[in-house]
Image (cartoon, helix red, strand yellow):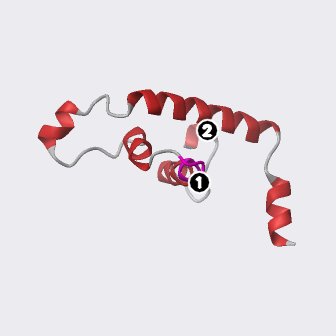
């Protein structure tokens, strides 16, 4: 995070993870695919050994949609949505 210019009181890796999880859930993606993509692994070690590609096709589509969303936000931030909700 520091190499990206964020100080410890501005953002953390877990903060980015939380933001991504929230936004992907709001966009309607499968929550299991989201958790698998964000590295929350299966607790059962035997099952985890066989789940390396679980949800892979959906995760690929989801990550492309996520990249497209970030590009959109970079170009036109969502300031209007926030101001409409407040007023």
Is 83 on the left-hand or right-hand side of 20? Answer: right
Within 10 Å of the Cα at label 2, are there few (<14), some (14-19), or many (20+) other Cα atoms?
Answer: few
- Please provide percent x and percent y for residue 43: 20, 49
- Looking at the rendering, the stretch of residues picked out in magenta corresponds to 23-28
Point 20% across, 38% down: residue: 48
Query: Dot 1 corresponds to which residue?
Result: 26
Question: Foreground residue, 15 or 8?
Answer: 15
- Please provide percent x and percent y for residue 10: 62, 56
Point 55% across, 48% down: residue: 28
**Disc 1 versus disc 2: nearer the observer:** 1
Label 1's element? Answer: helix
In the displayed structure, would residue 32 be above or below residue 3? Answer: below
Point 24% across, 45% down: residue: 42
Give the CA distance from mark 1 to mark 2.
26 Å
Within 10 Å of the Cα at label 1, are there few (<14), some (14-19), or many (20+) other Cα atoms?
Answer: few
User: Magenta region's main secondary structure?
Assistant: helix
Point 82% across, 71% down: residue: 86
Q: How many numbered marks are there?
A: 2
């Amino acid at each position: 995070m520091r190499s990206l210019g964020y100080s410890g009181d501005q953002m953390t890796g877990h903060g980015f993870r939380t933001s991504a999880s929230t936004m992907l859930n709001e966009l309607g993606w499968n929550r299991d695919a989201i958790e698998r993509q964000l590295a929350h692994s299966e607790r059962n070690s035997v099952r985890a050994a066989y789940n390396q590609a679980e949800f892979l096709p959906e995760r690929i589509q989801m990550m492309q949609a996520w990249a497209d969303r970030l590009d959109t936000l970079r170009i036109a931030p969502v300031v209007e949505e926030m101001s409409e909700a407040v007023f």
